[in-house]
């Protein structure tokens, strides 16, 4: 009897259903690591600005796999598996720093910043005794090298042999929309991480779900930062896995939410000092106040007014995900804009007036579907397709994610 | 060492933590001066000289806004904290008050009964003695030892 083949059948309805076993199947999780994260996809590793000088490094991840991203003495960026060729120990034990070489603490094997093995302690033994046989080729066991591409200050890596060029993978609309946000050299303002108590896919679905934002987050709705009645749109890439949701700052001042009696539109709720938090400028000059962009599988680029961040979605097990936030501005920011970004950062992250709720929501689903492996979620808002559209009362980007996911997984 | 200074800092932080742990959050902003500053950041950001905070407020009004949001706007599961505070370290004595550092551990207790060590770190406080027996925070910086927060940070630390 093979239980998995029975259970692991995608519902006949297709993209409008997501079977709940996708969030709790251990074998599927392992397969995702191989087929998606270590497969023909691009994973965001870090910002170029996180490697500020030659001979610097930053720890990152390709799914479960630990990775070191480096800038060598000549300024070139590399990424390789954070695993010693010898016994598999982590090579790099710090999050970031400066180094001319990387030395494994276990047995002192040494690597240069391109990930090449350059030294083995006592390779020839001591006084002619011991050491490694002369026909052993440890260099052939060196940590796997990632292919790297840097786009608009964002470093991506892949292990896949057939991953297309990054720009082709992003698609023309993402190329334009990423460049739009990355309008000048980035300047880091800080980071933190939020542990999401759910499978990684529930978090990424949440980000792609333009329907939930103004319904779950009263802050968005009450302060008209994002309402589905505001002008905007939803872009879904051809393969489905990359999306952009955006809305214009200018509001038509409709009262659809109030009329529908929605919890998120609370007319009795007001702030004493809203301008201290929400004051903003149209730094992009196009009237777009909010743009959330994802790249399959786990990259998020966020613009909420002047609050800019990249988020890395790192799976940490079946029901645990680390969301690594890095906030940035630009080297050209004046003091006023820099201060605005810090104030608006109250909206995001684990304590963010908006983002705190996403961590909770994904966890609610993870717990809600325990025991429902034979059931599926309904993903029918906006029909059954994955085409770009003006309306954000749609789950087209969520369906797009599953389209790409199923393609990579052969499901 | 001035025992009275130590006692005043310990007393202020003890009352502060008690208000949070006992869910008297409406009293929380009153521990600050009107233009008091409060922020939560991580040791990692601090070490890198990066200014980002998880929570950043520059007035009592902003602190009250945090509490109103928690009570009326934000969605999160019922939970409360238990603060355990270390002995204050008086870092500097100033004309109108002092600077002190106090370490803390906070357990989070969920509605379900699940109890976890939620946060550890220290407070960098600038305290002003604004009345003969009164003291308030002019500035309170919460520095978290870890960069990770489990799920969300709704209630202040």
Image: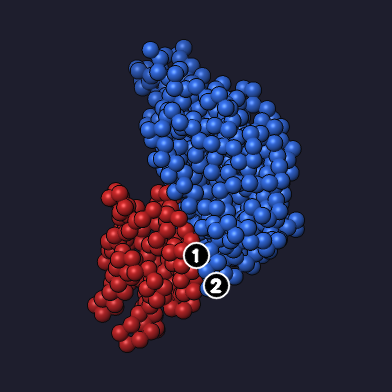
At 66% from the left edge and 34% from the top edge, which residue is drawn?
A385
Chain identifier, blue in the render: A
Q: Chain of mark 1?
A: B
Q: Residues within 10 Å of mark 2 (few under 14, many from 20)?
A: some
Quadrant that contains the N terminus of chain B: bottom left
- Residue A62 sits above or below residue A194 on the image: above
Chain identifier, red in the render: B
Q: Tell me, for residue B94, which label it has, or none.
A: none
> Does the residue at mark 1 contact the one at mark 2 (Cβ under 8 Å)?
no
Left or right side of A406 for A371: left
Q: Position of residue B35 (x, y in %)?
A: 48, 77
At 44% from the left edge and 67% from the top edge, which residue is drawn?
B67
Q: Which residue is mark 2?
A: A273
Closer to us: A340 or A378: A378
Q: Quadrant of residue A372 in the image?
A: top left
- Residue A365 sits above or below residue A117 on the image: below
At 31% from the left edge and 52% from the top edge, which residue is drawn?
B111
């Amino acid at each position: 009897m093979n239980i998995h083949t029975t259970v692991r059948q995608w519902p006949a309805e297709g993209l409008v259903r997501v079977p709940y076993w996708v969030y709790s199947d251990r074998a599927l999780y392992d397969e995702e690591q191989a087929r998606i994260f270590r497969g023909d996809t691009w994973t965001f590793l870090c910002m170029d600005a996180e490697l500020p000088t030659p001979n610097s490094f930053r720890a990152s991840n390709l799914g479960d796999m630990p990775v070191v991203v480096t800038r060598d003495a000549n300024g070139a960026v590399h990424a390789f598996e954070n695993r010693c060729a010898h016994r598999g120990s982590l090579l790099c034990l710090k999050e970031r720093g400066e180094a001319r070489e990387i030395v494994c603490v276990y047995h002192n094997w040494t690597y240069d910043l391109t990930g090449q093995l350059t030294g083995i302690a006592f390779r020839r033994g001591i006084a002619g005794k011991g050491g490694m046989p002369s026909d052993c080729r440890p260099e052939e066991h060196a940590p796997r090298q990632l292919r790297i591409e840097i786009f608009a200050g964002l470093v991506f890596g892949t292990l896949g042999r057939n991953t297309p060029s990054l720009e082709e993978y992003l698609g023309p609309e993402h190329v334009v929309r990423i460049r739009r946000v990355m309008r000048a050299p980035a300047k880091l303002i800080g980071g933190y991480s939020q542990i999401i108590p759910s499978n990684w896919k529930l978090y990424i679905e949440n980000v792609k779900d333009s329907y939930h934002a103004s319904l779950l987050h009263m802050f968005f709705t009450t302060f008209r930062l994002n309402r589905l009645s505001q002008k905007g749109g939803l872009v879904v890439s051809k393969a489905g896995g990359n999306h952009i949701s955006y809305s214009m700052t200018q509001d038509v001042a409709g009262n659809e939410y109030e009329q529908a009696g929605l919890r998120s539109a609370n007319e009795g709720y007001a702030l004493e000092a809203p301008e201290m938090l929400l004051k903003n400028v149209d730094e992009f000059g196009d009237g777009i106040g909010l743009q959330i962009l994802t790249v399959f599988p786990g990259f998020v680029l966020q613009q909420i007014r002047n609050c800019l961040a990249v988020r890395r979605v790192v799976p940490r097990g079946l029901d645990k995900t680390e969301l690594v936030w890095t906030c940035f501005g630009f080297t050209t920011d004046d003091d006023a804009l820099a201060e605005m970004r810090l104030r608006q950062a109250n909206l995001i992250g684990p304590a963010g007036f908006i983002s705190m709720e996403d961590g909770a929501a994904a966890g609610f689903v993870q717990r809600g579907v325990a025991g429902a492996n034979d059931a599926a979620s309904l993903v029918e808002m906006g029909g059954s397709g994955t085409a770009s559209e003006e309306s954000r009362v749609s789950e087209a980007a969520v369906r797009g994610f599953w389209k790409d996911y199923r393609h990579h997984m052969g499901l | 060492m001035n025992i009275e200074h130590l006692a005043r800092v310990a007393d202020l932080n003890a009352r502060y933590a008690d208000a949070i742990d006992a869910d008297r959050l409406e009293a929380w902003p009153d521990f600050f001066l009107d233009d008091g500053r409060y922020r939560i950041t991580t040791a990692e950001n601090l070490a890198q000289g990066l200014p980002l905070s998880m929570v950043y407020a520059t007035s009592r009004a902003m602190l009250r806004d945090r509490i109103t949001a928690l009570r009326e706007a934000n969605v999160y599961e019922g939970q409360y904290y238990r603060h355990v505070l270390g002995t204050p370290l008086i870092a500097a004595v100033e004309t109108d008050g002092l600077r002190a550092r106090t370490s803390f551990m906070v357990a989070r207790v969920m509605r379900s009964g699940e109890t976890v060590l939620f946060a550890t770190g220290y407070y960098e406080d600038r305290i002003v003695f604004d009345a003969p027996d009164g003291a308030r925070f002019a500035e309170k910086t919460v520095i978290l030892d870890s960069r990770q927060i489990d799920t969300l940070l709704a209630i202040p630390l």
